[in-house]
Image (cartoon, rainbow, N blue to C red):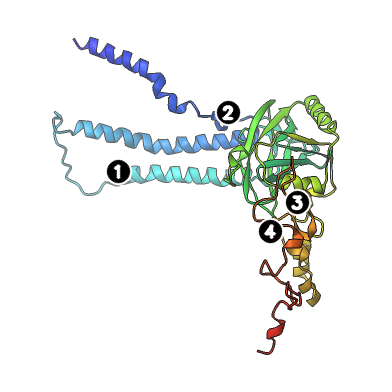
Amino acid sequence: MTARPFARTRVILRRLAPLMLLPLGACNWVVMSPAGDVAVQQRDLILISTVLMLLIIIPVMAMTVWFAWRYREKAQAKDYDADWDHSTSLELLIWSAPLLIIIALGAVTWTSTHLLDPYRPIERIDHARKVDPATKRLLVEVVAMDWKWLFIYPELGIATVNELAAPVDQPIEFRITSSSIMNSFFVPAIAGQIYAMPGMQTSLHAVANRPGTFDGFSANYSGAGFSNMRFKFHAMDNSGFDQWVARVRASGATLDRATYAKLEQPSEKVKPLYFAGVAPKLFHAALNMCVQPGKKCMDAVMMTDMHGGAGKESARDVAGLRHDGTIDVGGFHPVEPGKKGEIAQPAGMTQAAERTPAEQGSQAPGQQDHDGHGGGHEGHEGM
């Protein structure tokens, strides 16, 4: 009589099993099955931490069920009423296990924090191979834009948009910045994420251990086009990478500063672009926010500040000191507003000739406004 209901329940559960697995249908286990040694070590760190925590969680959950069952109202077991108020053995058991787990987690965290520091060059290709000191690292300069990724290979003299490639088993050094707001560079298959911030440079070292095409994206919300801010990372053998470089060089396009200014404007779902040539020190200019003509590089401004400033004359020299993300400082207009086939200037922006410092609340001392009156506070001296 009891076998038939149990068999019916088992059949129902078997039929419902696919529906119960539907919530996991969109899961991507790339973090748990990486293709690079750095990501493998990060996965192992997750597994070690999880196992150490389960050493406490599983016994506690099991004992909770066991005590609830053993001492339930209808239980046949006799009541246990111990006549004691302290047990050294029980106290040691209760506190020693969590303490040992905390010590183990602290040791793992300390070592992994230093060994997996994204700024630290990797010391091994995988668990069985060390990096040869003579091995040359592939340098890739990364600029996060709205909403696309620019990759510059300075040693190869090429650049790409929304497509990245590297040879298998060759250490990679990423130097990362942003052209506008903060983003996060993340290729889960090869390494962890690192932030990209305007006016600052971050670094990430990684290696790919097997060929394949992997997803890269921004892991930090950065506006309307964030969801489509993705790229492909191709891990290839040396001959495949050489062919990819040749294909990029065959494009014939050059990434000069005017082209960079066009790329810098917000756009979504940008298909991969290839550039056979790159303007000298373009990444340095992007990092220091001085790609546009007339702008002063931030490192030069900071150097001037460190030496006490540029004197009173610098009070009138403000044209190159605006680093607010506009594209019209100094009258530089790589794209005409509303030009057909191009991306129009963002709302609220006007041409440099139409925007005076007075209209922006930053009128220079001695500068005249539209009525011919002097600006600044010169007329208020002595008050």
The answer to whether residue 354 is above or below residue 195 is below
Q: Secondary structure at mark 3?
A: helix
Distance from the alpha carbon under mark 4 to that under mark 1: 64 Å
Distance from the alpha carbon under mark 3 to that under mark 2: 35 Å
Residue for badge 1 = 90
User: Residue 266, position in %: x, y?
Assistant: 67, 45
Q: Is residue 161 left or right of residue 79?
A: right
Q: Are marks 1 and 3 in contact (CB under 8 Å)?
A: no
Residue 222 or residue 196, whichever sits in front: 222
Tag count in the figure?
Answer: 4
Q: Secondary structure at mark 1?
A: helix
Which amino acid type is marked by label 4? Asp
Which amino acid type is marked by label 3? Ala
Q: Secondary structure at mark 2?
A: loop
In this view of the protein, can residue 298 be seen by the observer? no
Q: Quadrant of the N terminus?
A: top left
Tell me which residue sits at (21%, 49%) in the image: 85
Residue for badge 4 = 324
User: Residue 168, position in %: x, y?
Assistant: 73, 29
